[in-house]
Image (cartoon, rainbow, N blue to C red):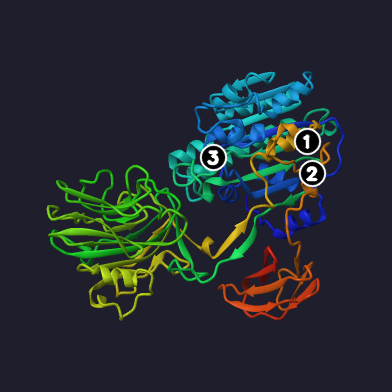
Amino acid sequence: MKRAFHLALACLLLITGTSVLGQSEDARVLIIGIDGTRPDCLEAAETPALDALIADGIYSPDALNNDITYSGPGWSAMICGVWSDAHGVTSNNFVGSNFEGFPSFMQRLELENPELNTHSFCHWAPINDYILGEVVDEAINSPTDAAVRDAAVSLLEGGDPHAVFLHFDDVDINGHGYGFSAAVPQYIGAIETTDGFVAEVMQALTNRPNYAAENWLVLVSTDHGGIGYNHGGTSIEEETMFFLASGPSVEPAVLVKDTLDILPAPENCIAPGAAELRFEGGGDAVVIEDSPALQLGADQDFTLEVRIRTQATPDVAIIGNKDWNTGLNPGFVFSFEYPSGPAWKVNIGDGDERADANGSSGVADGQWHTLSCSFDRDGMMRLYTDGVFSAEEDISEVGDIDVGSGWFFGSDILGAYSYTGALSEVRFWHGVLSEEAISAWHCSPLDAAHPNWASLQAHWALTEGAGAEVANSAGSGLVGTVQGAEWDQPEGVITFDYSNTPRIVDVAATALDHMCLTIEPDWNLDGISWVDGCNTTHVGDLDRSTIKASLFPNPGTGDFQITGLPPHASIEVFDPTGRPIHSAQPGSSTHTVPHTAGSGVYLIRIVDGAQRRTLRWIRQ
């Protein structure tokens, strides 16, 4: 997609209240659903057809399905315009559905005007089988995405459709098969192939003899994102989706999330602004090549510590030296309890004997946690969570655990059982560290004051921020190689406000509004319309930003002004490292922030009583 999205456009849309130009009552709608498409991966792919729609539309890469991120609830929310507590679908079996009480937008169109021609072509059959099949004029379950394209092109070339729903499934299929990640060629390839299908559908649409008079609105979205090989959870990677409303009458705009708050110096062991190494599954790893320094044999006591930040707890290999296909295989591994958390665990085996112990739960909350385990080879292995003892298990019967394939962070030695999240501060010691030492140092920078400093064999801080090498600060050698994982700024430094961006339930409301169907209050729709259709309430009328301040010039090189300030607002400015550098209570609507040194993204927090807003200023 190769596009840059600017907050200024979103702010302009919200401040001016402008969404689209006026329209007549003669309107048609095409909804294209691309299953399981992460917006960041859409950005990484080459998608000229979708780019062209974005250029003529309202687009958000920060829309949300912040309900249940399985396909059944997701498509029900999109098509009916309400959340799962209303439509009743909580899984892919559709048990408990309440489509009579909360019908699809297609059924509402048919009830209002049975003369409308409605069509649904889906690769994932349950959409037609449960949601749309009995209410539209034509419902086809297609065996492939290409068949969906063919049916749509045929209809648009020779039919007279008023409302069309298309479902493409191959992106989601490749996400489950290879990983929901921009680093996975099969996943990106499926997005690009689907874009080609969209191009053919759009060509058939725009080539219609009466296209200019038919007032088409094209809505493109997805039901969920993905993390690792799956979805269904509440991580932001699974909840974030994209929303696109495009057509001749739509005024282009880009809607992005807003920075909400800046966290103080954290209590979770990681300095604000520090880079982190993100693992997105699909074989992402740091590989430490095999070395005599890594050999543990059958007798060597040792202690391992690692910090993790994740919201997923599948049966992965966080760090280890073994083929994790079975716990009997020789080696050790940090993972999560089988099959899916919430507690973390440690396994050790020699090919004949194994031992397993579960640590504490609660480590998959998106914050940093330190996992430590000491291995007394003729006694116990002891697990500690954030410096607090969690569990122990006898490992005296486990023999040689060397494999000769090196150590891996983020996957097992075969590149499987991939971890999703961030890792840092991996420490490898000879000997058994005491409970006191583990507790005192689990969240402290490592230095020579540590009581076991002389026993430290390797220390991979994972703070490089760039490049393919991970240094061992404890000495020469044992340098790690990054494979697939990417450096990123931690999301934990700031929190984000998504109130300015669409939700999945907005698709149905936007379609109904464009089709000039009056949205009655007793329908209790959860969605809102993002186009200026025939209803009296539009997104431009909503107060979606409590403080409508803006910055000028942005980007800039010296002083900059904040305008639109409430009379009692206070201001705090943070430099790119998170350090406060300026504060004021202007008492007027405009304030000038003096010259700041250093390029990067500065955060400006504005507080007015209970209301707050954080803006971003870029110093070039």
> Percent position (x, y) of residue 161?
75, 24
Q: Nearer the viewer, residue 187 or 75?
A: 75
Quarter of the image for residue 453 reads bottom left
User: Contact (CB < 8 A) between labels 3 and 2?
Assistant: no
Neighbor class of circle 2 (other Cα within 10 Å; few <14, some 14-19, many 20+) is some
Which residue is rendered at x = 53% and y = 40% of the image? 69
Q: Quick check: 146 above or below 495?
A: above
Provide the residue designation for mark 3: 68
- Image quarter of the C terminus: bottom right
Which residue is rendered at x = 43% and y = 53% of the image? 364
Q: Nearer the viewer, residue 6 or 49?
A: 6
Please name the amino acid that badge 3 sits on: Ile
Q: CA distance from mark 1 to mark 3?
A: 25 Å
Which residue is rendered at x = 70% and y = 59% of the image? 7
Q: Quick check: 553 above or below 145?
A: below
SS of the residue under disc 1 = helix
> Percent position (x, y) of residue 72?
54, 32
User: Contact (CB < 8 A) between labels 1 and 2?
Assistant: yes
Please name the amino acid that badge 2 sits on: His
SS of the residue under disc 2 = loop
Q: Quick check: 584 above or below 56?
A: below
Quarter of the image for residue 386 reads bottom left
Q: Quick check: 6 above or below 112?
A: below
Provide the residue designation for mark 1: 513
Q: How many numbered badges does the structure rendering display?
A: 3
Quarter of the image for residue 296 reads bottom left
Residue 277 relative to residue 527: left or right: left
Provide the residue designation for mark 2: 538
Please name the amino acid that badge 1 sits on: Asp
Neighbor class of circle 3 (other Cα within 10 Å; few <14, some 14-19, many 20+) is many
Residue 398 relative to residue 111: left or right: left
Q: Nearer the viewer, residue 246 or 399?
A: 399
